[in-house]
Structures are given as C-alpha cells and as structure tokens.
Amino acid sequence: MSSAPESPKSQVKPWPRLRRGLEHDFTVVKVREDVVMDPRTNLEHPRVHMDCADWVNVIAVTKQDELVMVRQFRCGIEAATLEAPGGVIDPGEDPATAAARELEEETGYRAGRLEALGVVHPNPAFQTNRCHTYLALDCERVSDGDLDEGEDIAVELHPRADLPRLILEGHITHSLVVVAFFLERLRAEAKR
C-alpha cells in the first residue's frame, strides 16, 4: 500500500533568520533587512521586513442600503482614492472596537451592528501585519467625525448596488478595499 504524497504545504520549509538587520522606525512602519537561509540550497539571502500595526477596514451600510465611503489623498500614488473607512488598530485594542472607532472617527457614522468578515495578510512577502474586515450594518450618522492629525477625508454615500461598477470602472482601486468587498460577498453567498 502506498502512502499519499505530501501536500505542497508540508513540503515548504521555513527560512531561518541568520541575522537581524538594523531597524529604521518611520512611526507607521519599522523596516529592516534580515539575512535568511534558503533551506533547500543553504544559501543566504537578504530580505526586507516591514513591521506594521494591524489594520481594520469597515464596510459600512446605512439603513437605506447605502455604502458609507471615504475619499482621501494618498501620498503613495499622489491621488485621492475612494475607500472603505478604516485605519490602524491601536496597541491592545480589539479589532471590533477599532472598527467601530475608525468608522465613527472618519465618517461620523455609528453601526447598529458589527460583523467580522475575515482577516488577510496585506503583503506576506515582507509585511508582518494583518487587515481585519468588518461589516457595519444599520449605520446612522451621529456626529461630524473626529479626524486624526494629518487626515483630510470626504465622506460619500453610494448606493450599494453601484459597488460592482465602482470597482470595475476603477473608482475603487485600493486592493484591501476590493478584498473587503469580496469577503463580504463570500460571506453573503455562504449564508444562502
């Protein structure tokens, strides 16, 4: 009797870190270059490592079935982007608490109920963090928001039915926001 072949996951071995490089702290991210060893060849390779706090994205839906979105300037692409509300999870903060906080701070909306949709690794090639996605339902505007220093955000309401068009026509291009809406769709399909 032959045994089943090993799954590809069990054949992939960890790459041990041989040396930890000098760390540069840029407030929102700590960057360093480590030296790791390829377990297959035993050769050393430099690898960039970025330590970031975990993030949260919130798909916020009003009682009128409108998406509460934010538009903000992003320095990386030197343009404004249409996104879901979200941000950094503070040290020791629960992701659901961060989702509710970020939604209210950025938009002035409060969720009637909050549901976890999933967690992804933004870029596991060199980032350590995760991005949590929440669905906020029955959202109501309770304030003008409370933006953090350095934030300039415009709140926009979009009919939920317009979401596919907003993504396909390139109005929503932030990859983690597209993933958030995909997680929401998968969750909805799984409930059917």
Image (spheres, grey):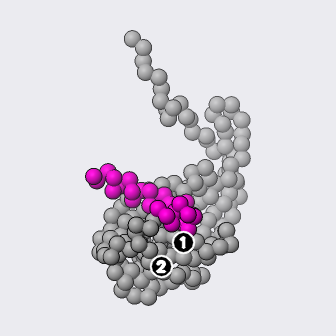
Where does the magenta region start and end? Answer: 164-192
Task: Find residue 122 and report its horizontal and vertical position in percent.
Answer: 54, 57
Q: Which mark is residue 156?
A: 2
> What residue sits right under mark 1 in the picture?
82
Kindly identify the residue that appears in the image at 56 percent across and 35 percent down: 13
- Residue 144: percent from left, percent from top: 44, 88
Q: Are marks 2 and 1 in contact (CB under 8 Å)?
A: yes
Instruction: Relative to 94, say whether 119 is above or below.
Output: above
Viewer-proximal residue, 14 or 58?
58
Mark 1 Cα shell of 10 Å, populated few (<14), some (14-19), many (≥20): many
Q: Earlier in the sequence, mark 2 or mark 1?
A: 1
Can residue 97 be seen here? The reply is: no
In the image, 182: left or right of 174?
left
Looking at the rendered structure, the kind of residue marked 1 is Leu
Label 2 amino acid? Glu
Q: Position of residue 183 (x, y in %)?
A: 42, 56
Quarter placement of the N terminus: top left
| Outermost residue, left side | 192
Gap between marks 2 and 1, in whole Å? 9 Å
Q: Is residue 107 above or below residue 93?
A: below
User: Does residue 170 show up magenta in the picture?
Assistant: yes
Q: Circle 2 sits in a helix, a strand or a loop, which is it?
A: strand
